[in-house]
Image: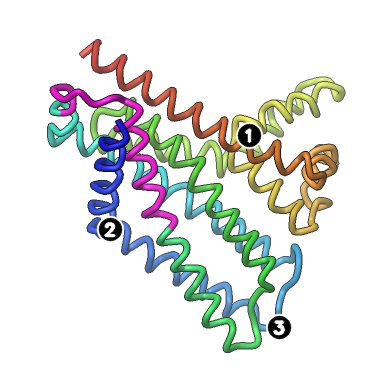
């Protein structure tokens, strides 16, 4: 089982680094990071600031979309070229196959983000603008967590979609709902409910959107908890406590494993139903 997992992971790494999409994403990400440096020329930024918030927002627009596309296309591409059908003839467990693809793609995406932050950090060290090391570390963690969560969602999309075009439709829809439409939809829906219901329902709803609870967590870690509003006051208080960090890590792990389990179940269901 471990041999199969390692083989699939290595294959995904090889394919990922040969994919022109990966290098296009790398160039875009580096350009986007350097643009932030040019905008921020007043000195080193500490904690949560306007430029930090702008960088987080732009990362929210870019990383989940690219991650969803690369992850979903990786699986649907194998469906279209017949590789997926070939898998059924081998004694290969779903855990090895799906886990190998996930870890392989995760390493490819993390390599791209690491290069982007490294290039920006090196350049900023020779200029009068940039971020402190702690802010860089938290922004990097923000990117890593987004990739981990949305890559797991991409596995679910890949298990459902039959073609790349179908996967692209799902990707855009999910990305728009989680990133663009989340706030206005929550305001519209929760605004119709009694006031006492808003906070508990908002908390429950937030647990289903990784972009939202990851954003809130990083903002709290940067010291900008007042930015997110009174509805998240208890979240901020809890997240700044040591137990909150542990619970956040567990929440991320459970979310990723839950999505991967769902993707595996959907894949098997599609296999047996033709």
Mark 3 vs mark 2, CA separation in Å: 37 Å
Pointer 2 with pointer 1, Cβ within 8 A: no
- Quarter holding the C terminus? top left
Q: Earlier in the sequence, mark 1 or mark 3?
A: 3
Helix or strand or loop: what does disc 1 sit on? helix
**Separation of residues labelled 1 and 3 (CA atoms):** 37 Å
Q: Which mark is residue 251?
A: 1
Marks 1, 3: nearer the viewer: 1
Q: Nearer the viewer, residue 23 or 174?
A: 23
For mark 2, does the 10 Å Cα neighbourhood hold few (<14), some (14 to 19), or many (20 or more) residues? some
Which residues make up the magenta segment?
87-110
Q: Which of the pair 179/224 is nearer the observer?
A: 224
Q: CA distance from mark 2 to mark 1?
A: 30 Å
Residue at image location 48% in from the left, 53% down from the top: 63
Label 3: which residue?
42
User: Which residue corresponds to the image point at 48% horizontal and 48% vertical from the top-left?
Assistant: 147
Q: Which mark is drawn over residue 17?
A: 2
Reading the chain from its start, which is encountered first: label 2 or label 1?
A: 2
Q: Quadrant of residue 247?
A: top right
Q: Residue at x 86, y 25 (%)?
A: 195
Residue 166, placed above or below residue 137: above
- Figure quadrant of the N terminus: top left
Compared to residue 108, the image places residue 253 above or below, namely above
Question: Alpha-carbon neighbours of circle 1 within 10 Å: few (<14), some, or many (≥20)?
Answer: some
User: Which is more N-terminal, label 2 or label 3?
Assistant: 2
In the displayed structure, would residue 80 be above or below residue 41? Answer: above
Q: Is residue 21 left or right of residue 133?
A: left
Q: Quadrant of residue 241?
A: top right
Foreground mark, 3 or 2? Answer: 2
- 101 drawn magenta: yes
């Amino acid at each position: 089982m471990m041999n199969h997992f390692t083989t699939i992971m290595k294959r995904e790494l090889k394919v990922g680094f040969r994919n022109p999409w990966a290098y296009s994403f790398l160039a875009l990400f580096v350009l986007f990071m350097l643009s932030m440096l040019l905008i921020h020329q007043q000195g080193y930024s500490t904690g949560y600031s306007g430029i930090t918030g702008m960088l987080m927002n732009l990362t929210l627009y870019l990383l989940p979309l690219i991650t969803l596309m690369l992850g979903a296309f990786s699986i649907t591409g194998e469906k279209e070229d017949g590789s997926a059908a070939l898998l059924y003839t081998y004694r290969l467990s779903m855990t090895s196959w799906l886990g190998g693809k996930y870890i392989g793609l995760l390493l490819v995406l993390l390599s791209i983000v690491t290069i982007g932050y490294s290039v920006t950090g090196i350049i900023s060290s020779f200029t009068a603008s940039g971020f402190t090391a702690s802010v860089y570390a938290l922004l990097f963690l923000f990117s890593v967590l987004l990739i981990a969560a949305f890559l797991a969602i991409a596995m679910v999309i890949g298990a459902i979609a039959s073609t790349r075009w179908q996967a692209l439709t799902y990707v855009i829809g999910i990305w728009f709902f989680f990133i663009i439409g989340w706030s206005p939809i929550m305001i519209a829906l929760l605004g119709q409910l009694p006031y006492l219901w808003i906070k508990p329902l908002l908390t429950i709803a937030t647990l289903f959107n990784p972009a939202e609870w990851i954003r809130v967590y990083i903002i709290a870690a940067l010291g900008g908890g007042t930015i997110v509003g009174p509805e998240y006051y208890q979240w901020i208080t809890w997240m700044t406590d040591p137990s909150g960090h542990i619970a956040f890590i567990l929440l991320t792990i459970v979310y990723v494993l839950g999505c991967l389990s769902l993707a595996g179940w959907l894949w098997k269901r599609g296999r047996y139903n033709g």
